[in-house]
Image (spheres, rainbow, N blue to C red):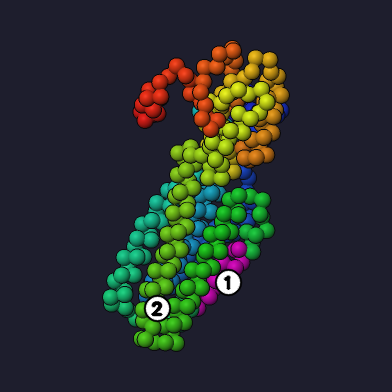
Amino acid sequence: MSATATKYSDHDAGDSAYNHSAEQVRLSVLGFAVVLTLGFSAVELIGGYYANSLALIGDAGHMATDSASLLFALIANFISRRGADATHSFGHGRIAVLAAFLNGLVMLGVVGWIFYETVGRLENPPAVAGGSVMVVAVIGLIINIGVAWSLSRDKKNVNTRAALLHVMGDLLGSLAAIAAGALVYFGGEAFALADPILSFFVGLLVLRGTFGVLKESSAVLLDAVPENINYFDVGDALSKIEGVRHVHDLHVWTLAPGHGSVTAHLLMADDVDWKKVLDDARAMLEKEFGIDHITLQPEWGGEQCQWECVQGVCRRKDVAPQQADAAAKAA
């Protein structure tokens, strides 16, 4: 970060602990996970192709999307370490979020292909080398267990915890591929449909994870209120602080993964200690809502209050309701 950017973007005592740079990760842990999962997903893809197993190919796609997410997180982490600068005053933390969103879009295409192939194989099931499927899937299961153990050693980082959840899903995919291989190998033609049916199950696993990634990443990119925070509860809580008459122009969003942000205008009583109100508001928002990036603006409006409030959110009385509604729709 340049000296000029630091001059204006640094936080003083009492400000948020978030410094607009990404949370640092243990590169050795995530790097180990990326190498193993990405490498073996390629092995599964090749093995699935030669064994003619859609379940194995689907599991390879599942592992590939998780390893790609980890890889994007590593790359984004290097970029976002720079923190805020003169052209990115909020830092570069959302690069990882954008990468996750793009990865989710790619995986939608992969899932669509799996479902398309499943339909064709249900109508005309091909011969599958069940023994080869079992061997490759068992190796994949062992690798996933090793990766899960490695990631479980670094529980402090949010990216690592998320990666661990993805790997647990990979374990289920590997089990499905093992089951498909075993049914085909020991049951013969009577279980020829096992591979496409279980590949459909693997596709559902990938689809569930993909929708989760797209939902979470798009919410951050669109500055949505965090799922664990009720917008009106924040307004009500600020309104109840001693010395605060009304709250308006309230905005709550996710600044970066794990860091909520709030800005608001507080209409104050005439004889109030603003420093105490600010300290009380910061402590309350961090304790009750986990919001650590807080910007509050005090206002004094005299004896005649110019605001009317509903559930802690206010608008000026001199603006007609229909005008306010029209302005909200236009925005």
Q: Nearer the viewer, residue 9 or 86?
A: 9
Q: Which numbered tag is attached to residue 60?
A: none
Q: Would you name the residue on which mark 1 appears?
A: 142
Relative image position of residue 234 (x, y in whole percent):
58, 35
Q: Is residue 57 visible?
A: no
Q: Which numbered tag is attached to residue 194?
A: 2
Crowding at dot 2, Cα within 10 Å, few <14 / some 14-19 / many 20+, comes out as many
Q: Secondary structure at mark 1?
A: helix
Residue at left 69%, top 29%?
280
Residue at left 37%, top 25%?
322
Q: Amino acid at mark 1?
A: Ile
Q: Is residue 106 magenta?
A: no
Q: Nearer the viewer, residue 154 or 183?
A: 183
Residue 1 lies left or right of residue 207; in this view the side is: right
Q: Nearer the viewer, mark 1 or mark 2?
A: 2
Question: Disc 1 versus disc 2: distance between alpha carbons?
Answer: 22 Å
Q: Contact (CB < 8 A) between labels 1 and 2?
A: no
Residue 46 lies left or right of residue 94; in this view the side is: left
Stretch of the chain drawn in magenta: 135-148
Q: Amino acid at mark 2?
A: Ala
* Rendered image quadrant of residue 35: bottom right
Q: Is residue 251 visible?
A: yes
Q: Secondary structure at mark 2?
A: helix
Crowding at dot 1, Cα within 10 Å, few <14 / some 14-19 / many 20+, comes out as few
Main SS, magenta residues: helix
Disc on the earlier residue, 1 or 2: 1
Relative image position of residue 238 (x, y in whole percent):
61, 30
Residue at left 37%, top 73%?
196
